[in-house]
Image: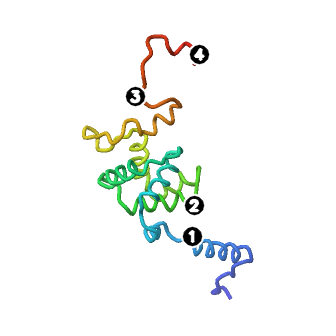
């Protein structure tokens, strides 16, 4: 009976069944488009990618429009990012973004939020100076602030 294939043992059958069920439960990333891209969804995706709370709807709409005009970023890429962000976090999210080849889109979104600027090098334009997430990350008030003179930083508040 050399011509017969060896039968799967219980472990192989169990792992195959689990893998099949997992594949059914997690649709491919490309099905994320069915949910649609809204400013609110872009804002929540951006917050997760940036790691800080973002709540400026107007700025989100401007960044979304500008990012969609950049090479290497499409609506489907942003939808795929939203899909991943809604289901994962931490290292698993980073690995999924890299595995789905969404690094460029994620980097452009994060750079736009933190800098408040969009565009290719040499053609950048400022969407918001005071609304840039960099000020949140620095932990002090965003400009414009009042300069109180040399050495003012050394006195207690």
Give the residue at x 30% y 51%.
Answer: 70
Residue drawn at (53%, 46%) of the image: 53
Which element is circle 4 on? loop
Q: Which residue is mark 3?
A: 144
The answer to whether residue 105 is above or below residue 134 is: below
Q: Is 33 rendered above or below residue 117?
A: below
Q: Are marks 1 and 2 in contact (CB under 8 Å)?
A: yes
Number of labelled discs? 4
Image quadrant where one finds the N terminus? bottom right
Q: Earlier in the sequence, mark 3 or mark 1?
A: 1
Specify which label sits upstream in the sequence, 2 or 4.
Answer: 2
- x and y percentages locating residue 67 in the rendered image: 34, 51
User: Which of the numbered marks, if any, corresponds to residue 87?
Assistant: 2
Q: Are marks 1 and 4 in contact (CB under 8 Å)?
A: no
Count neighbours of disc 2 (C-alpha within 10 A) and say few if under 14, some if 14 to 19, many if 20 or more: few
Residue 156's tag is 4
Q: Residue at x 58, y 53 (%)?
A: 89
Left or right: 9 with respect to 157?
Answer: right
């Amino acid at each position: 009976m050399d011509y017969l294939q060896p039968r799967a043992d219980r472990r192989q059958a169990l792992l195959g069944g689990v893998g099949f069920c997992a594949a059914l439960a997690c649709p491919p990333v490309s099905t994320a488009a069915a949910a649609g891209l809204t400013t609110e969804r872009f804002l929540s995706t951006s917050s997760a990618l940036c790691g800080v709370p973002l709540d400026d709807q107007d700025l989100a709409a401007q960044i979304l429009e500008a990012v969609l005009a950049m090479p290497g970023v499409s609506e489907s890429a942003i939808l795929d990012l939203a899909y991943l962000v809604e289901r994962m976090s931490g290292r698993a999210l980073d690995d999924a973004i890299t595995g789905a080849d969404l690094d460029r889109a994620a980097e452009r979104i994060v750079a736009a939020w933190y800098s408040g600027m969009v565009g290719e090098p040499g053609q950048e334009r400022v969407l918001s100076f005071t609304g840039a997430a960099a000020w949140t990350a620095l932990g002090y008030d965003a400009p414009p602030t009042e300069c109180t003179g040399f050495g003012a930083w050394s006195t207690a508040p």
